[in-house]
Image (cartoon, grey):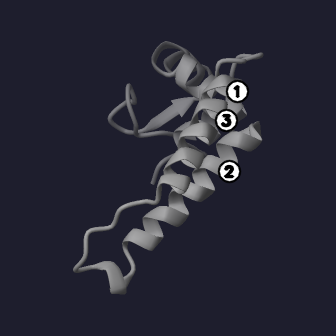
Amino acid sequence: MNNHICYTGVGAKKTGNHTQEEFLKMMNKTSKKECAIYIQSLKCISCKKWGDLFVKELKRANTKQLKNKTYKRTNKTENKLKKLENKCKRCQNKITKKCNLNNYITFSGARLGKCE
């Protein structure tokens, strides 16, 4: 099993190379709560629906036909986004477990192996 992790984000060494123990210690110090919230949101249906609708609205706002116009969401869409966001926040507040090595790797965008 590979014993090194490449991570160049917050709190990382200049080289980006960390042992699993170093990586876990650093992530527990810098991102413990944020990781748990992120992992919980991946399991929450309301968070997924909110993200999908939000991205859909961003794409709609960036279409060529709307480039020269001001885009405003409809009240129906705005209300739906707010409702889903509130449900998502409730999901995120129900954190049931701490992040493990794989969760931290998913959350941080790190990868197994040494940095090149």
Q: CA distance from mark 2 to mark 1?
A: 13 Å
Q: Can you say which quadrant of the picture contains the C terminus? A: bottom left
Which residue is label 1 attached to? 91
The single residue placed furthest to the left in the displayed view is 68
Q: Amino acid at mark 3?
A: Ser
Asked if 99 appears above or below 109 in the picture, the reply is above
Residue 61 locus on image (x, y percent): 39, 69
Question: Which residue is painted at 49% across and 50% down in the image?
Answer: 78
Q: Is residue 38 left or right of residue 75?
A: right
Residue at the spot x=48%, y=39% of the render? 7
Which of the pair 64/96 is nearer the observer? 64
Residue at mark 1 to residue at mark 3: CA–CA distance: 7 Å
Decide which of tag 1 and tag 3 comes sooner along the chain.
3
Q: Nearer the viewer, mark 2 or mark 3?
A: 2
Identify the mark nearer the N-term, 2 or 3.
Answer: 3
**In this rendering, the label closer to the viewer, 1 or 3:** 1
Q: Residue 10 in the image: x percent, y percent?
A: 38, 30
Circle number at residue 70: none
Residue 49 tag number: 2
Give the amino acid type for the residue marked by disc 2 in the picture.
Answer: Lys
Q: Which residue is mark 3?
A: 41
At which x and y percent is residue 98? 70, 17
Q: Residue at x 60, y 27 (%)?
A: 89
